Image (tube, rainbow, N blue to C red):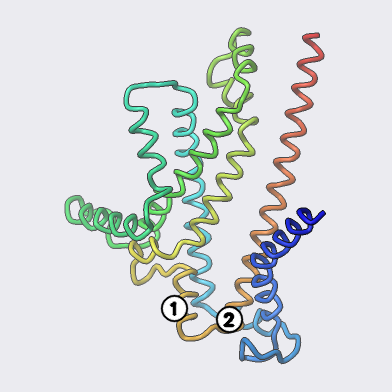
């Protein structure tokens, strides 16, 4: 009894430590007062003011485009890398390949950002591309470290996948491409969706690497918020943060429903296959 009470207390403390600051931020985004820490009544004027903040909106639109592009490319490259590590067995250089894929997971962001900046400067000097720093360089930089997360997630899913289903399809004469798109891809789709959401969030949240590889005309949303916070938090930032929390929560709920549906369909297919074989 004492042990269960202690566990519940620690869980409540942990959840409070994680979510009470976010709840306070959401509440103070409806604060009438310009002073962030002084409550002046309920109001939505900061949401209306946010719509007229061109700098904030431009930075948010740029961050959303970069996050969508980098997450999409990371899913494609990360899925290929995860399949290579999970399905091609022990080939020559596999240890080096796996280490290079997962190295961005443990590499400090300062080192990654500085090395990518040197790479882009050298490429511009030798071949003239990329011309300056901007959306292209930020997107490439985000792909380099978000791809590692997608590769690890897809590889974990493929390792736990029962290969007898694919072998049965091969015995029936299905080609490898058809097996991948009809059998493998639907089964690992929850992992791919999770990888895309994780890559999108990491890209949208990145500040350090983007600071190294961005140019004067390519300021992302975290950079704008960070520069604004240094001069004092405004209620408009609270309103913007509340909108982002709402979008992320909606995305997580939709992804959760999608993955639960895919898992339910997979179990039904396995039960039907087991019943037909019996």
Q: Quadrant of residue 249?
A: bottom right
> Where 80 falls versus 26 (above or below)?
above
Which quadrant of the structure image shows residue 220? bottom left
For this view, does 103 lie left or right of residue 62? Answer: left
Q: CA distance from mark 1 to mark 2?
A: 19 Å
- What is the quadrant of the N terminus in the image? bottom right
- Which numbered marker is on residue 227? 1
Residue under the image location 46 percent in, 86 percent down: 231
Q: Work out whether 237 lies above or below 83.
A: below
Q: Position of residue 158 (x, y in %)?
A: 56, 29
In this rendering, the label closer to the viewer, 1 or 2: 1
Dot 2, crowdedness within 10 Å: few (<14), some or many (≥20)?
few
| Mark 2 lies on residue | 52
Q: Quadrant of residue 275?
A: top right
Residue at image point 37% right, 37% down: 99
> Eyeballing the image, is 97 above or below 209?
above
In the structure shown, which secondary structural element does the residue marked by tag 1 occupy? helix
Asked whether, in this view, residue 163 is left or right of residue 104, the answer is right
């Amino acid at each position: 009894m004492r042990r269960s009470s202690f566990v519940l207390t620690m869980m409540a403390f942990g959840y409070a430590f994680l979510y009470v600051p976010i709840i306070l931020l959401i509440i103070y985004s409806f604060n009438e007062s310009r002073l962030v820490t002084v409550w002046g009544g309920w109001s939505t004027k900061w949401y209306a003011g946010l719509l007229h903040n061109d700098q904030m909106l431009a930075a948010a639109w740029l961050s959303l485009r970069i996050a969508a592009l980098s997450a999409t490319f990371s899913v494609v490259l990360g899925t290929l890398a995860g399949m290579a590590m999970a399905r091609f067995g022990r080939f020559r250089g596999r240890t080096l390949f796996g280490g290079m894929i997962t190295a961005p997971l443990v590499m400090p962001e300062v080192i990654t950002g500085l090395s990518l900046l040197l790479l882009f400067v050298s490429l511009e000097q030798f071949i003239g591309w990329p011309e300056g720093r901007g959306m292209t360089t930020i997107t490439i930089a985000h792909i380099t470290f978000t791809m590692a997360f997608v590769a690890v997630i897809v590889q974990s899913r493929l390792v736990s996948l029962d290969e007898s289903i694919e072998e049965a399809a091969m015995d029936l004469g299905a080609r490898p491409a058809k097996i991948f798109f009809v059998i493998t891809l639907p089964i690992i789709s929850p992992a791919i969706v999770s990888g895309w959401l994780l890559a999108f969030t990491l890209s949208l949240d990145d500040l350090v690497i983007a600071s190294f590889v961005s140019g004067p005309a390519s300021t992302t949303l975290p950079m704008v918020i960070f520069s604004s916070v240094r001069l004092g938090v405004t209620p408009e930032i609270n309103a913007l943060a509340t909108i982002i929390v709402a979008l992320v929560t909606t995305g997580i709920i939709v992804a959760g429903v999608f993955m639960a549906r895919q898992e339910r369909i997979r179990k039904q297919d396995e039960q039907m296959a087991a019943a037909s074989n019996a």
